Amino acid sequence: MSRSALRICPLCEATCGLTLTVDGTRVTGARGDRDDVFSKGFICPKGAAFGAVDGDPDRLRTPLVRSGGELREATWEEAFDTVAAGIRPVVERYGPHAVGVVLGNPNVHTMAGALYPPVLLAGLGTRSLFTASTVDQMPKHVSSGLLYGDANAIPVPDLDRTGHLLLIGANPLESNGSLCTAPDFPGRLKALRARGGTLTVVDPRRTRTAKLADRHIAIRPGTDALLLAALAHVLFEEDLVALGDLAPHVRGLDDLRAATEEFTPEGVAAACDVEPALIRTLARELAAADPAAVYGRIGSCTVPHGTLASWLVDILNILTGNLDRPGGVLFPQAATDRTPRPAGPGHGFRLGRWHSRVGRHPEAKGELPISALAEEIDTATEEGEPVRAVIAVAANPVLSAPDGDRLDKALASLDFMVSVDPYLNETSRHADVVLPPPPPSQSPHHDFAFNTLAVRNQVRYTRPAVPLEPGRMAETEIMARLILAVTGLHGSEPSAVDDLVIGQTLGKAVREEHSPVHGRDPRELAEQLTGESGPEKRLDMMLRLGPYGDGFGARPDGLSLTVLLAHPHGIDLGPLESRLPQPLKTPSGAVELLPQPIAEDLPRLRRAMAERPDGLVLVGRRHLRSNNSWMHNVPALTGGTNRCTLHLNPTDAARLDVRDGADVRVKGAGGEVVARAEVTEDVRPGVVSLPHGWGHDRPGTRLGHASTTPGVNVNQLLDGSLLDPLSGNAVLNGIPVELTALGRAG
Ligand SMILES: Nc1nc2c(c(=O)[nH]1)N[C@H]1C(S)=C(S)[C@@H](COP(=O)(O)OP(=O)(O)OC[C@H]3O[C@@H](n4cnc5c(=O)[nH]c(N)nc54)[C@H](O)[C@@H]3O)O[C@H]1N2
Ligand SMILES: Nc1nc2c(c(=O)[nH]1)N[C@H]1C(S)=C(S)[C@@H](COP(=O)(O)OP(=O)(O)OC[C@H]3O[C@@H](n4cnc5c(=O)[nH]c(N)nc54)[C@H](O)[C@@H]3O)O[C@H]1N2
Ligand code: SF4
Ligand SMILES: [Mo]
């Protein structure tokens, strides 16, 4: 007998509601939940393959513990005993910074990943934190931190109400959107055009998104900051700056004008490969559109001027009066956000409070660049101890970060490593203990992170669609036990971790004057929490303290877990609204248009105006039926165009004598790989493209299907030295490469 169950899809940032068909403990089907308040039935091929992803036979079912050099199946008790015995001596002998914590992307797709890593980090006290953010969106956090005083205050384009979208280095028709949670992003772009709006796409590749656009600009990779600076220049020069309601909330307009003065369309044209007349047209269109939104993603972040480009995206929205305006870009308000405090000056955002030991990279948002992880492990200095133990949670940096070969060796040299991961893969194969979370159907779901980036305010929660199988442990409990094991509390009840957080959070809330629970007794509040588990109680607490919450009785019709459970398809909380100045936490209480670190980085951008190196550069690409490194093991999602091939333009192919289907050697600073050539007009001349997350040919993994078509690791072309200096973000796009034709493959 089959039944249906609801589950929010965790396979990308769009957070679609799914209706699963469940037979026993197996998910046999998935379709879009038409009643979902946000996704309204939308589903993509990945969501439709939820059952296959969930039921992959290579998913680990029990912990693995290394003994006699080999990973063997073990009990949970043995596994946590081994973790405690492995990590504690490293902390005690070398101090907390000798333990590196590595957090990967799926942490933003699980409740465990939202609720427990902050407790783990606070408990350990380590500064050796490396996450997927520094191969992704750290430049955006840094620009938001500097502009608004809050690294997490990221305005999102109001897709459904805008009249013009200038989209830079993003391909939502394949990615389904990022830092802009919007189920059916493709449909929303089509609707924009259908209502008479316009879409401009800036991308060196003619992507599916570019094909949908009114205008596609095939920019030279890595030069978007120059283009954007020139757009700002034109807005000033042609008197098109119109702050509107923003005027009282910004500081430094004259300094900004002076700072963009040199970036003339004529000055940047050659570097960007965009005609000056077109740059002027773009600026005028942006100013004229009412309203308009500028949005940048991976192609604007993972480049040498990532922070400047991210800053300029917001600057353009500000100069045209589109920040915090319906149809422009707005700050979402999620149900689990903290109670908004009254507007006023804040502590601001600081960079470089400490530095990495070897490369002296400044921390950003408490993190060190993941590009520096290998050297922090394999290089001794007089500054302090190298990283000797690693706790990796949902991370596969051997494939996702620069120079996987070096990192592979570095991880093998550690005193101890633990991975929380469902797969034995390129990274987890180095662990001494692997702790496998259950498949998504057996986990509850709420989008703590993506609701703060969503194009509509809404809240949804799904309990596990399938009960936890015998022998499985919820990922929230795995994380709680891991925290206890590494902080010297091994053996305590995992609920102690949740109780601690609840006690601290409520203790703080009752002391805040603007809190709905100001002056109340935290123990009395804790007793009111409902939920079947520690994490559910924490969700209840966050909802009740949050901007729409019941305030523990202060606002009786407000949100709580009980209310949310009564709405299985979610609750719509309305369109995004103007919120300034409340979200601002800068010392001035205003938007700081030209923060000091940005001003100090501008000379580097000025020099880039004169740079136009010869030779090919490489960019990445994503495929709809994939996700970073971990979905190549699902047969239903591989094959067709989802292959690790090298795209190159026919003119480059002819010049280099590379034929379609032939093997090509690609050489970069960090190494070389051999890939099959795919000659296509979809990439501009001078640029080649390889997808990331491939290279499943290392021994000792358990990825039966992926290893049959392993592909190559594009990040081996990097040596880890190319970074955006302000954010520490890796440069993954626009990297110089050399090609050698190897003849036609058989
Ligand atoms: N060249 C190049 N490199 C890139 C990029 C690029 O565009 N070009 N993109 C970068 C970006 S944006 C990102 S976010 C990173 C991603 O980098 P990573 O986060 O390192 O890689 P992922 O493949 O997303 O997955 C990490 C791990 O999570 C595990 N996992 C899957 N589901 C779960 C779960 O429910 N719980 C737990 N605990 N683990 C789970 C997977 O098995 C995998 O081992 O890659 C980056 N690397
Ligand atoms: N199907 C699928 N969906 C995903 C993922 C996935 O792997 N597969 N990964 C998820 C993750 S972790 C993330 S972060 C998001 C990313 O979401 P997006 O940013 O939308 O994803 P990409 O497809 O990498 O789009 C980046 C685009 O930038 C272009 N580009 C490269 N260099 C430059 C440049 O210098 N300038 C400009 N203007 N463009 C450039 C590339 O050609 C590419 O088309 O997607 C998420 N969704
Ligand atoms: S778009 Fe993303 S969230 Fe929606 S079904 Fe596809 S993978 Fe899942
Ligand atoms: Mo990402």
Image: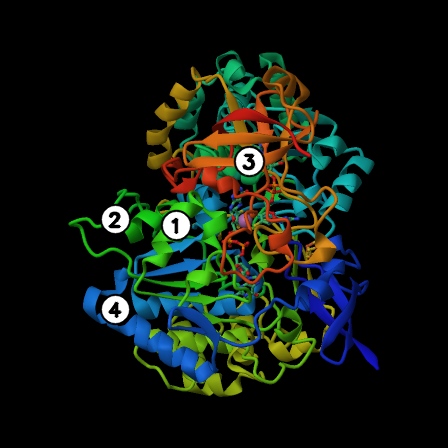
- The x and y percentages for residue 458 are 66, 61
Q: Is residue 134 left or right of residue 359?
A: right
The residue sitting at 30% across, 44% down in the picture is: 362
* Amino acid bearing label 3: Val
In the rendered image, the vertical position of residue 608 relative to residue 554, given as above or below: above
Q: In this view, does 1 lie to the left or right of 411?
A: right
Compare residues 220 and 212 and report the one nearer the observer: 220
Check disc 2 and report the residue beneath it.
Answer: 379
Of callouts 3 and 4, the N-terminal one: 4
Check disc 1 and report the residue beneath it.
Answer: 407
Q: Quadrant of the C terminus?
A: top right
* Amino acid bearing label 1: Leu
- The x and y percentages for residue 461 are 65, 70
Of callouts 1 and 4, the N-terminal one: 4
User: Which is closer to the viewer, label 3 or label 1?
Assistant: 3
The residue sitting at 32% across, 30% down in the picture is: 600
* Amino acid bearing label 2: Thr
In the rendered image, the vertical position of residue 746 relative to residue 351, given as above or below: above
**SS at mark 4 in the image:** helix
**SS at mark 3 in the image:** strand
Q: Name the disc covering residue 674, or none.
A: 3
Of callouts 2 and 3, the N-terminal one: 2
Check disc 4 and report the residue beneath it.
Answer: 91
Of callouts 3 and 1, the N-terminal one: 1
**SS at mark 2 in the image:** loop
Compare residues 588 and 57 and report the one nearer the observer: 57
Q: Can residue 591 be seen in this view?
A: no
User: Which is closer to the viewer, label 4 or label 2?
Assistant: 2
In the rendered image, the vertical position of residue 742 relative to residue 356, given as above or below: above
